[in-house]
Image (cartoon, coloured by chain):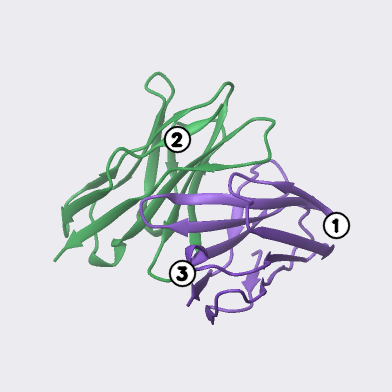
Amino acid sequence: DVKVTQSSRYLVKRTGEKVFLECVQDMDHENMFWYRQDPGLGLRLIYFSYDVKMKEKGDIPEGYSVSREKKERFSLILESASTNQTSMYLCASKWTGGAYGYTFGSGTRLTVV
Amino acid sequence: AQSVAQPEDQVNVAEGNPLTVKCTYSVSGNPYLFWYVQYPNRGLQFLLKYITGDNLVKGSYGFEAEFNKSQTSFHLKKPSALVSDSALYFCAVRDLGDDKIIFGKGTRLHILP
């Protein structure tokens, strides 16, 4: 089975800090995604990447950037954390083959104080 | 543009009773449809998918889903609910030829002992 690992389960950061959320997958998948999840809003796509050094904006990219230097690792960066970025962040990797579903990491619950 | 709707924010079912979590979708072509489950403070876990073929799809933990093309629905079902089924359930759709999956806002399922 594909494994998607997010480095931190819980994080608490201060307003204005630069925050890195890391995601690693172990199946050589090309497409990876970052979502944030908020109550009543479901999952919203922040950024996605379809190959090394390639990135595309999702629906809510403002205040975020991403890095994909190696195929297995996709990092989400909060350049200057704000309290409205307190959320659950989910990384996903897209299966290869015909099914094209996603495998998700366990999530990082980020609190910005 | 593709979309998915989960009309119920919450569903309450007594343990042992059958359960249904509703989902409707809109795509321009043939859909790929998915159900995911999320337990507290965890990522999303894949339950089942519909790609083509039999309209009744069986998945993990005794869940199944029925694809209905005329009603553009993909309702999640289980014949006999367990308290441990209590979780947040997401329906998702992917349009053929698109790399991105669109998620519904989620339905919280409460199984009452």
Neighbours of disc 2 within 10 Å: few (<14), some (14-19), many (20+) = many
Q: Which amino acid, by three-letter code, is at mark 1?
A: Val
Hey, which quadrant is residue A33 in on the image?
bottom right
Distance between mark 3 and mark 2 Cα atoms: 22 Å
Q: Nearer the viewer, residue B84 or A73?
A: A73
Q: Nearer the viewer, residue B84 or A48?
A: A48
Report whether B77 appears left or right of A101.
Answer: left
Distance between mark 1 and mark 2 Cα atoms: 30 Å
Q: How many marks?
A: 3
Q: Disc 1: which chain?
A: A
Neighbours of disc 1 within 10 Å: few (<14), some (14-19), many (20+) = some
Q: Are marks 3 and 2 on the same chain?
A: yes
Colour representing chain A: purple
**Label 1's element?**
loop
Q: Nearer the viewer, residue A87 or A27?
A: A87
Find disc 1 in the rendering and name its residue: A52
Question: Which residue, as the protein is rendered here, is positioned at the far top?
Answer: B70
Q: Which amino acid, by three-letter code, is at mark 2?
A: Val
Q: Are marks 1 and 2 on the same chain?
A: no
Q: Nearer the viewer, residue A103 or A91?
A: A91
Find disc 3 in the rendering and name its residue: B42
Q: Which amino acid, by three-letter code, is at mark 3?
A: Arg
> Residue B10 appears at what percent x and percent y?
24, 50
